[in-house]
Image (cartoon, rainbow, N blue to C red):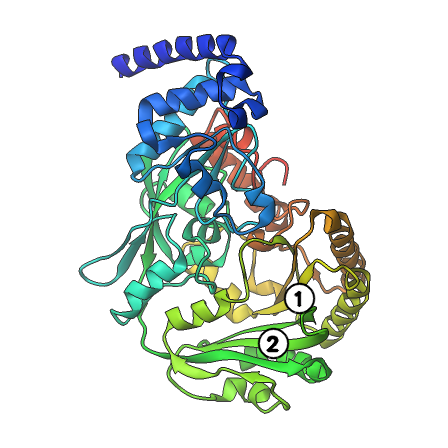
Amino acid sequence: MVARQLQLLSLVAVARSVAGSISPAQVNAATAQAANLPVLACCLLLEAELGSKTSFPQSAPYNASVQSYWSEQDNAVNPTCIVSPNVTADVSVAVGTINQLSRFDLECPFAVRSGGHTPFAASTIENGIVIDLSAISQVMVSEDHTVTSVGPGARWIDAYLKLDAMGLAISGGRVASVGVGGLTTGGFVCDNVANFEVVLADGSAVNANSEEHSDLWYALKGGSNNFGIVTRFDFKTFAQGLLWGGSMVFPIETLPEQLSAFVNFTSSENYDPYASLINSFGYEPAAGAMFVSNSIVYTAPVANPPAFQQYTSIMPQLVNTMRISNLSDFTLELNVGTPYGFRQIFYTGAYANDLGLLTQLANQLNESMQVVNPLKSLENYAMSLEPLPTAITKWGPRTGGNALGLDSSDGDLVLVLLGITWSEEADDDIIINAVTDMFTTFNAYAASKNGLNSYTYLNYAYDTQKPIRGYGPSNVEKLRAVSKKYDPLMVFQKLVPGGFKLFTS
């Protein structure tokens, strides 16, 4: 320990010297553009500690990381350097070094990236350091097949392909290319995590589960990037064979019938635990028309089960890919609808499962689309509805609790996601204003009908939304207490600006 402290003191002296002596002309053009010499000094120290796992602008590893984000907004961000660990010990060194340097007034802002699928640059940073977890992507199944250990940099397809071959599954994301890390700590997948291995602000690695650091285990189930860097997720694993599922696309004229079916499907008294549905409707510029699309999965090889017959009976059907297949196949199908290389925005809300509310929501979407339809760069403008019946929300407390604040007393809810894809930065303001105006108007209407719920799904939230606040005052206070306990210097609050913070969101 003493030797390590002496080493860090030496590094601090070097860093101060570096920060005071390097001129922009002495570094390559891309780094000089940032002109943030203290951060550059931190990067050079991390390079001394981790070697080639620290990369700089214009290098192949750096470019590969920067250009691999989902949204074009993220791809345009240029960190000062990127740290690419491939084991937990590397993460410990990186975080511990950044923490120690901050004690000597050398603050190094950083971001943490697993899959890089958040559209508003939560997992990258300008004039800072990105810790890119992509290489920590292991998928390992225990001998008794009860636990699957997955690295945060894995994509869901990595886990599903391995587990499908073994007749197993874990709860996870529906889109193949989404990363495991952010999705799990931000939402519903968290309830199936038996253990988190997490690197804390001081660089130490601990396990958080129902027996060890149980308060941290609770906080990581919805608390996002506020407590440390998760380097391994141990998921409860279950037997899973083939499924029935796919997509059905309909003319927009069927929307009233679709919404009625959705409300009936979401009602807890009709809930089938094998059935999963996402109902989407919106405008497809390439076709010059609006459509309704249903993404359906039934977790048993039963074709056209009763739970979905209210949908399969709707005609006409323009597309029908329903089939019996495996989980990997279905997530790859959905992946086609989320292309890389475009500008993206998400916005979300939660509402009572009420036909009148959903009809008004569809009307608001139609009005909003009139504003953005003339934009030539528009690629997609769609609203998705996801059922949240009490039969689902009751499970959080039964699996050790989570921070989300959802309770069966809220009644049956509908989770709403508005997703927009476009290509031109010049259209950003028009699209963002159209989205925020639509939700401001609709939320006021929903509140007047007692149909607005405070829950805001963090993984779907726009950067101006306040998902942490939506967890409720009691949960927010618990999360803040956990943060103060495990991160007393507030490293993950002050030096990690991306995402949604505990004291501001």
Q: Residue at x 51, y 77 (%)?
A: 296
- The image quadrant of residue 240 is bottom left
The answer to whether residue 91 is above or below residue 312 is above
Q: Are marks 1 and 2 in contact (CB under 8 Å)?
A: yes
What SS does tag 1 mark? strand
Taking depth in this image into account, of 11 and 197 the one nearest to the observer is 11
Is residue 364 shown above or below 488? below
Q: Position of residue 156 (x, y in %)?
A: 40, 59
| Amino acid of disc 1 | Ala
- Name the residue beneath numbered marker 2: 293
Please count the marks in the image.
2
The quadrant of the picture occupied by the C terminus is top right
Say left or right for 399 vs 436: left
Residue 243, relative to residue 41: is it above or below? below
Residue at x 70%, y 58% (from the top left corner): 377
Q: CA distance from mark 1 to mark 2?
A: 10 Å
Q: Which residue is mark 1?
A: 382
Q: Label 2's element?
A: strand
Q: Residue at x 34, y 37 (%)?
A: 85
Where 414 sits versus 313, above or below?
above
Q: Is residue 140 left or right of residue 432?
A: left
